[in-house]
Amino acid sequence: MQIRLRNLKRNYASLHAVDDVSLDIPSNTVYGIIGRSGAGKSTLVRLVSMLEKPDQGEVYYDDKRVDNLSKEELIQERRKIGMIFQNFNLFSSRNAEDNIAYPMEICHMDKAYIKKRTAELLALVGLEGRGSAPISTLSGGQKQRVAIARALAVKPEILFCDEATSALDPQTTRAILSLIKEIQKKMNLTVVMITHQMEVVRDACDRVAVLDAGHIVEEGPVSDIFASPKSDVTKDFLSSLTNVHESIVRWSNDGGHYTLRFRGGATDEPIISTVSAKTGAVFNIRAAGVQTVNGEELGVMITDIGPDGKTAAEAVRLLQDMGVLVEEAE
Amino acid sequence: MDAVMSFFQSTMFTLVVQATWQTLVMVFLSTIFSMILGLPIGILLHVTSSEEQGGIIPHPVFYNVLSRIVNILRSFPFIILMIVLMPLSRLIIGTSIGTMATVIPLSIAAAPFVARIIESALKEVDPGVVQAARAMGSTNWQIILKVLIPEALPSLVSGVTLTIINLIGYSAMAGAIGGGGLGDLAIRYGYQRFSPSYMVSAVIVIIVMVEVIQFIGDRISAHLIAKR
């Protein structure tokens, strides 16, 4: 199911939590919405998932407008979406299978069907035989698996993930993300992932929108955003990623006036040697690495270019001609 | 042996057993009625409270009026409330004295207390869980019955235990105005007839009652938590 947002606005007192957001979330994709804390992510997800009504603007699921529904319609419409949360939000008064059964119970589904479907869902998320486990006995990853199963119980077409991996360690995060991707393909879901972690966008999303101060500052396929980030916020997110990620090797802590980003085929060509031969520029590489973004290889190199400014400028021009994105530090 | 036999056949023993039975009946019935009155009020208080407090249908005016009424009722000294409510007992039961007649003021006196206990137990429920239930398309009734009450159950059980123990105390006071029970026994025999043995036995029975109820309540609450 496709989701369209048109000029969404939501204010709290004098704060514009979400300010004029328009987005098209295509059907059958994993769509990331990334932003720092306070950027308006939580408000946006509450608006898109019909938990809150916008002050202005419209939300469409396919062609159905859902932001102005009556109470009863809202309840019916919410039963068609799935949602998972940072803190899992499972019912502690119910064991794993009864948590998964809840959304079906409230729709008054047949008991035998609920039982059968619960077993199916437990298997889908890799928790066969753990149905009777009390929630407190499960690990964080297992809790999120139960939450995913619960969200998928009513066969929704949309799954919202609100910081779904933020409370998990990196290894569990990867496992949960690959589970979500796998389920997305299997059920042709539209997954909307709200996060502040660039790793999540890199590992799971097809497209991403970057949210800052209530605005969308950048939007596009993840590999494009990674290869040529435009806004400062996005660059910040990317640099935090390159610093923490072990695929980038830094052998010098100072210097590095230029950041070069290569993508796809460019990573295979001897670009630096070619440029060096043509312009006489010398490269002093400070850090470099390759990471895989959404199945595409992306190279990053932090370097100084010499011997003088003129040669460097020429080299930069040539690099850009060859499809390398060059950022200059101030 | 003879001493033991004569104790069991003594007037005091018969009177204490009778009074204990009356107290149990009073406490049992007034617990039930105060729950019937207090539970809906407590739920109403919680659901109409502000969103930050976890209310699912926030209604500030309704909440404030109801909250004020509950506070006024709670601040009434019980002995005065009993006297005020005597005509009501006469209206419903036909008499304003006796064990059954005291059940009415007891229930009404405990109801606002129960309402507050229920409200605070429900307030402890994780708001995230309520949000999840709402996002899945639960109706307000489903949130109350399938989420709030089950999630708060251990605290609710503790609250009921506290209510019962409070009612044991209240019921002793009710004895003072002709309600029967252990309080009545202690005052009429122990105080007015200067028989400390009556006073002591009444107090011992009350202590045992409180201990047993607290023990059972704690066990049920702990059992519910252990299952989670």
Image (spheres, rainbow, N blue to C red):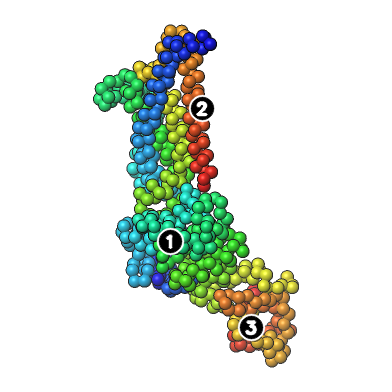
Chain letter for the residue marked with disc 3 in the picture: A
Front in this rendered view, residue B84 or B200: B200
Q: Residues within 10 Å of mark 1 (few under 14, many from 20)?
A: some
Please, what is the three-letter code of the amino acid marked with disc 2?
Glu
Q: Which mark is residue A267?
A: 3
The chain holding disc 1 is A
At 32% from the left and 57% from the top, the residue drawn is: A71
Front-lying residue, A102 or B67: A102
Contact between marks 3 and 1 (CB within 8 A): the answer is: no
- Quick one: quadrant of the N terminus of chain A? bottom left
User: In the rendered view of the protein, which quadrant contains the C terminus of chain A?
Assistant: bottom right
Q: Is residue A68 visible?
A: yes
On the image, the x and y values in percent for residue A283 come to 72, 82
Residue at x-position 36% and y-position 71%: A62
Image quadrant of residue B132?
bottom left
Q: Which mark is residue B211?
A: 2
Disc 2 with disc 3 on a shared chain: no
SS type, badge 1:
helix
To which residue does mark 1 refer? A117
Q: Is residue B43 above or below residue A293?
A: above
Q: Position of residue B53 (x, y in %)?
A: 44, 46
The kind of residue tagged 1 is Arg
